[in-house]
Every structure is written in structure tokens, then in C-alpha cells.
């Protein structure tokens, strides 16, 4: 079970975040200011941190992050901020943040991103192929197979499938897909992504067998690791 | 207009300053001319006296007496009286009857006065003691030169006085005219502050600094008026467009409270309410996003964006959706000018194009055609469809927040798509044009060469 440190000064927001993370199955500790958060983070024992960008007093969010990174703590950090301007986001990521989420956000967006960050933390050895149940893709030749049969995918469909497989068993939101597969940062374009997913489904699914990519209502998609 | 405020006007002060500057210069010039003229005249007189005295003193005593005796004949008006006097000042010969004390003491040309029938007459004279102890004196009537000097001085003084008067009058006139203009502007500003937003500052013909400033302010007022109207439009839009879904949510929940009895029914009601509220939240987010973009803060993240790539990505994103609706979505013009770049934000440009395509897909009936074009020659991106088009009268209005023309009321959407496009275009210094594609609609975003 992953232990998450939440540093957030606003009590209501903090409660909301802690609830969402506990519901998702994380163990959560909460700090209300930068000093306390930094001390707890330094003490160790956390797998990831959710850090508010605007904290009262010093150090603020970016200050905490900078201190952590200069002392060589590699823990993945997700920055929360009410500031969504692009340069703010870039500043956050440059200061050593691993992901950035703008308030207000949906709980599922936060947990999905944390799952992705935690997964990234344990990099698999340089693999050349990904497997999920009966699906297999070759990362070098960009060839996809199901039950040993080659599936013809367009480049974008291949990218979608690869991302879903990399996060097999995790909920992936439409915003994450849009950011990772298309490479643009934007509000979600729900129905457009859905059409891509449904085309991908048509190609990878076999009649009579359970669907591999499932829609999680109000959240996104999940590709089941085993069937 | 209050006279006491006159000295505070800039033009009055400037006029006074120039008057003082001009006055000082003139004074210096006058003084120089006066000093030179008077000096020249006096030197001339003194040289003449010197010459006369030298001439007489070199003559033999007999000749001198002869000459002095003949002198009155050459000087009938006694304009240059000369005479010889005994050592004690007793008159001996010549038409200068007395030897003034000043002459005996000075040993250089000196002014003195001789009494006459009328007023005393000013003279300048020069005296020297001859070897035999006699005094020899020559002099010249300086009434006219002195008069001339006085005349010169008076002329200069009156000219100076006139200049001062005219200058002051000019300063007052200038100050008063600028005060009138400032007063008119102040009045206009007060009216604007009090709510007359259509009021503009008065501009008088020319292009002087005040007029230029006024025109700038008027331009600013145009922008402000537009913004205020937009804000008002947005408020009205929020009121109208958000009230409907909120009422629906409330109604649904109340109905559930009254009638629902099973967990299933409650769950259904909650799901419907959640959906409605999520859509509302989305609208709010879109609004916030538009205002954030309007604030222009995002320009800091600009870089060179390869437009052909962005368009290819947008078309790629929407291709399946278009196919699903049986529309052809075609990208053109990007084959050759792959290196067209624009200083901007790739994600925002992507969003703008995505919104245009999204709209086209929404409104074009099945079997229709959508063309996305990158025009290198005219520096424009255009999205053209052969759908129902937008009536000419509504082309400007559709860019406003929450505007949805009647036929589109039934389609999903929050009426913010095109305003987002407009804001993104504005942020990138692009011009947005909506034209008739006969049939259909063409929206183009064009920019000027950098």
C-alpha cells in the first residue's frame, strides 16, 4: 500500500484530498504548512507527495520542492495549484515537480495521476515489449498482437494502446490520454477521445470475449491486465 | 472658468516662461546696442575736443588769440564755444565766457552746464593749462546727442513695455484656451464617471499633444465600453444559461425527495444531478479559461509553433468523429509550407482549431464536407464547411460569450466555443473572419507578417 504525504493549508481542500486518496486505498498523512511538510518528507517513508503550490509563510510549495530536490529526495511530487497559466505550470515542473494539476480538479483525476506517478517510480528494466493479458505490443517494431495475431493499427491507435498498456490496471483519464498521446495540454475533449477508443476497441477485441478496455463512468478508461 | 486657476495652467506658465526668456534676451540686446551707440557718440565728441585743444595749444600765443577771436564767426550759434582764460580764471578771449570749475579740475573731457535764457544747456568741454599759466578751454554743445540718448532709452523702454503687455495678454489667452479645453475634458470625464459610457472627450481638429492624448483616451474608452458591454453580456449569459440547468437539477432532486422510495430511484436522481452539475462546472471552467486568456498572462509561454503539425494533429484527432458522422474532413495547403511558424502557444492554437472543427462537425449535416486549410500566401488558417452557414447579421455576435443562434439551441454546447477561438486569436494577434462559403461557412484566422 502506498503512503502519500499531502501538504495543503486549506482544511476543506485537504479533507477532500485525503478522503479521495483514502478511498482509493492509499495511506495518507497530512501537513498544513511548508515547514511541517518538508520535515515529514525528509523523515521519509512516503511514496509520493501532493503539494499545494501556494502555502502560507516560507517555504511555499516551490520552496519545499526545491529543498527536497537539493537534498536529493527523489520522491515523485504532484503540484496542486489554483494558477493554471502555462508559465506557472512550467515553473512548477522545472522546480522538480513530476506532474501538475489545476484546482478545482476531480478526485479521479488526482488518483489516476498519482497511480501513474507511482508506477513511473519503479521503472521496469529496458523492456522491448509490453504485455497485458492476451495483448502484446513490440515497442521496437510498433507491432501489436492479440493471441499471436497481428492487429493493424494506425500510429495514433498504437500510441493509445501503448499508453493504456503501460498503465494496465489503472484508471487513465481522458485528459491524461490527450496530454500523453496527442501531446497538447487542454480541457478534455470527451467525445473525440471516446471515438478513438471505440475504434481501437473494434480492432483489438475478439467477439465473445470480455472487453479489454473498459469505460470507467465519470473517470476515463481502464485496460485490464489479465483476462 | 476661474481666473485664479489661470496661473496653474501649463500653457500660461510656458508662455510666461518664454516671455521672461525673450524679455531678458531683448533687454540684453537693447543694453548692448545702447551702450555701443552712446559710447561711440561720446568717443567721437571727446576726440573732437582733444583735436581742438591740441590744435590751439600748438599755435603761438598771438596766433591762438587771433584764432579764438575769429572763432565766433565760424560758430554763430555758440555750439562749440572756446576761450582763453588767465591763471585765475579771468576771461581773456573767445566765445566761452566763463571757465567752469569742473573743467579746471578734470584734466580730461567732462560734462558741464551753461546757464542760458531757457533751461541750462549741457556742454562737454576740455581745458588745459598752457605753459604761460593761461587756461585754454574748448567745448561742445551736447544737447542733441543727449536728447538722442534719452530718446533711444525711451523707445527701448516703451518697446519693452509693449512686449511685456502683448506677452502677458498672449499668455492669458493661451492659458484660457487650454483651460477651456481642459474644463471641457474634465466635464466629459465626470459625465463618463457618472455612467455616460458612450460619452467621449472633445477633440479639436488639429493633432497637437492634447488632441493626441485625447484621441488615445477615447480609444481606451472605446475598449472599456466594449469590455463593460461584454461583462454585462457575460453576466446576462450566465444568468440565462446557467439558470436553466440549475433549475433542472433542483427540480430533479425535489422530485426525488417527494416521490422516490427505492435506493435505485435515488441513485438515478443523484446520477442525473451529477451529470448536470458536471456540465455546469465545465461551462464555468471554460469561462474562467477565457478570462484567464484575456488577461494575456499566457503569452509568457509562447514559442515558435509549426502550424502544419498542429493542424495535422487536430485533423487526426477529429477524423474518426467526422467519419462517424459521415463527413469528409480534409486537410489542405500543408503539403509544401511545412515550415510556417507562428509565435504562440501550440496547445491554444490546437484548441482554437479543434473548436472550429468541432463546431463544423456539429452543424454540418451528414455527407457534408469540412476543409481545414493552411494558407501560406495569405498567412491564414481557415476551416470551411458546406453546412447551413451563419447569417451575415449574426457573424459578429457569434463571437460573444453564450451566443447561440436559434437552430443551435437544440445541439449540445455551452456557446463558448467561438468566443474561446476569438480570445485565442486575439492573444496571438490574429484576425478572425467569418465569411460565407456559399454554401456553408468559412472561419479564418489570419495574422500579419512579423
Image (spheres, coloured by chain):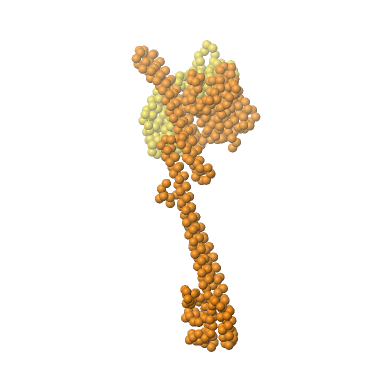
- Residue for point 42% across, 30% down: A50
Question: In the image, is residue B86 above or below residue B170?
Answer: below
Q: Can residue B333 be seen in this view?
A: yes
Taking depth in this image into account, of A111 and A140 the one nearest to the observer is: A111
- Colour in which chain A is drawn: yellow
Q: Can residue A76 be seen in this view?
A: no
Q: Which residue appears farthest toward the right when viewing the image?
A: B336
Q: Which residue appears farthest toward the front when viewing the image?
A: B117
- Quarter of image, res A54: top left
**Chain corresponding to orange in the figure:** B
- Assign the C terminus of chain B to one quadrant of the image: top right
Taking depth in this image into account, of B357 and B2 the one nearest to the observer is: B2
Taking depth in this image into account, of B85 and B42 the one nearest to the observer is: B85
- Residue for point 51% across, 26% down: B398
- Residue for point 46% across, 35% down: B198
Residue A32: horizontal and vertical position, in percent?
A: 37, 33
Residue B386: horizontal and vertical position, in percent?
A: 59, 21
- Residue for point 48% across, 33% down: B226
Amino acid at each position: 500500500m502506498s503512503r502519500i504525504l499531502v501538504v495543503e493549508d486549506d482544511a476543506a481542500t485537504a479533507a477532500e484530498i485525503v478522503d479521495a486518496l483514502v478511498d482509493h486505498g492509499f495511506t495518507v498523512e497530512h501537513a498544513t504548512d511548508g515547514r511541517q511538510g518538508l520535515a515529514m518528507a525528509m523523515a521519509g517513508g512516503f511514496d509520493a507527495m501532493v503539494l499545494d503550490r501556494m502555502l502560507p509563510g516560507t517555504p511555499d510549495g516551490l520552496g519545499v520542492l526545491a529543498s527536497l530536490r537539493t537534498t536529493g529526495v527523489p520522491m515523485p511530487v504532484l503540484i496542486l495549484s489554483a494558477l493554471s497559466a502555462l508559465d506557472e505550470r512550467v515553473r512548477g515542473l522545472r522546480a522538480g515537480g513530476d506532474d501538475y494539476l489545476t484546482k478545482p480538479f476531480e478526485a479521479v483525476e488526482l488518483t489516476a495521476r498519482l497511480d501513474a506517478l507511482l508506477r513511473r517510480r519503479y521503472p521496469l528494466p529496458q523492456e522491448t515489449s509490453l504485455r497485458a493479458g492476451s495483448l502484446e505490443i513490440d515497442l521496437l517494431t510498433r507491432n501489436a498482437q492479440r493471441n499471436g495475431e497481428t492487429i493493424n493499427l494506425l500510429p495514433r491507435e498504437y500510441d493509445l494502446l501503448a499508453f493504456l498498456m503501460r498503465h494496465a490496471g489503472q484508471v487513465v483519464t481522458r485528459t491524461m490520454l490527450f496530454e500523453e498521446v496527442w501531446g497538447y495540454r487542454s480541457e478534455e475533449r470527451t467525445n473525440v477521445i471516446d471515438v478513438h477508443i471505440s475504434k481501437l476497441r473494434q480492432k483489438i477485441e475478439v467477439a465473445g470475449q470480455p472487453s479489454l478496455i473498459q469505460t470507467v463512468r465519470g473517470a476515463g478508461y481502464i485496460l485490464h491486465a489479465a483476462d | 472658468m476661474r481666473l485664479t486657476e489661470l496661473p496653474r495652467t501649463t500653457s500660461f506658465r510656458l508662455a510666461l516662461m518664454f516671455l521672461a526668456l525673450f524679455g531678458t534676451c531683448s533687454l540684453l540686446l537693447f543694453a548692448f546696442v545702447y551702450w555701443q551707440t552712446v559710447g561711440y557718440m561720446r568717443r567721437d565728441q571727446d576726440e573732437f575736443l582733444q583735436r581742438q585743444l591740441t590744435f590751439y595749444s600748438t599755435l603761438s600765443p598771438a596766433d591762438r588769440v587771433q584764432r579764438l577771436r575769429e572763432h565766433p564767426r565760424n560758430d554763430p550759434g555758440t555750439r562749440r564755444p572756446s576761450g582763453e582764460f588767465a591763471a585765475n580764471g579771468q576771461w581773456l578771449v573767445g566765445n566761452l565766457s566763463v571757465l567752469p570749475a569742473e573743467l579746471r579740475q578734470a584734466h580730461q573731457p567732462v560734462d558741464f552746464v551753461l546757464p542760458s535764457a531757457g533751461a541750462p544747456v549741457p556742454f562737454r568741454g576740455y581745458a588745459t593749462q598752457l605753459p604761460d599759466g593761461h587756461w585754454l578751454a574748448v567745448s561742445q554743445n551736447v544737447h542733441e546727442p543727449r536728447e538722442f540718448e534719452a530718446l533711444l532709452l525711451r523707445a527701448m523702454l516703451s518697446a519693452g513695455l509693449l512686449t511685456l503687455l502683448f506677452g502677458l495678454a498672449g499668455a492669458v489667452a493661451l492659458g484660457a484656451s487650454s483651460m477651456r479645453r481642459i474644463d471641457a475634458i474634465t466635464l466629459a470625464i465626470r459625465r463618463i464617471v457618472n455612467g455616460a459610457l458612450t460619452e467621449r472627450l472633445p477633440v479639436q481638429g488639429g493633432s497637437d499633444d492634447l488632441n493626441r492624448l485625447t484621441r488615445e483616451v477615447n480609444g481606451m474608452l472605446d475598449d472599456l465600453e466594449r469590455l463593460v458591454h461584454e461583462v454585462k453580456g457575460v453576466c446576462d449569459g450566465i444568468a440565462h444559461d446557467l439558470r436553466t440547468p440549475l433549475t433542472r437539477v433542483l427540480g430533479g432532486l425535489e422530485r426525488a425527495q417527494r416521490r422516490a422510495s427505492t435506493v435505485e430511484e435515488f441513485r438515478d436522481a443523484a446520477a442525473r444531478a451529477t451529470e448536470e452539475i458536471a456540465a455546469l462546472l465545465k461551462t464555468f471552467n471554460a469561462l474562467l479559461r477565457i478570462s484567464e486568456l484575456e488577461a494575456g498572462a499566457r503569452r509568457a509561454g509562447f514559442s515558435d509553433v509549426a502550424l502544419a503539425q498542429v493542424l495535422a494533429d487536430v485533423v487526426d484527432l477529429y477524423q474518426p468523429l467526422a467519419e462517424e458522422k459521415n463527413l469528409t474532413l480534409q486537410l489542405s495547403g500543408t503539403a509544401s509550407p511545412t515550415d510556417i511558424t507562428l509565435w504562440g502557444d501550440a496547445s491554444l492554437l490546437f484548441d482554437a482549431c479543434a473548436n472550429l472543427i468541432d463546431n463544423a462537425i456539429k452543424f454540418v449535416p451528414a455527407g457534408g464536407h469540412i476543409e481545414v486549410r493552411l494558407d501560406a500566401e495569405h498567412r491564414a488558417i481557415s476551416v470551411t464547411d458546406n453546412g447551413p452557414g451563419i447569417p451575415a447579421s449574426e457573424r459578429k455576435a457569434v463571437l460573444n460569450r453564450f451566443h447561440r443562434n436559434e437552430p443551435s439551441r437544440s445541439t449540445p454546447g455551452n456557446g463558448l466555443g467561438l468566443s474561446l477561438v476569438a480570445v485565442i486569436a486575439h492573444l496571438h494577434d490574429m484576425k478572425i473572419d467569418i465569411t460565407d462559403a456559399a454554401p456553408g461557412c468559412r472561419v479564418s484566422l489570419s495574422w500579419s507578417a512579423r
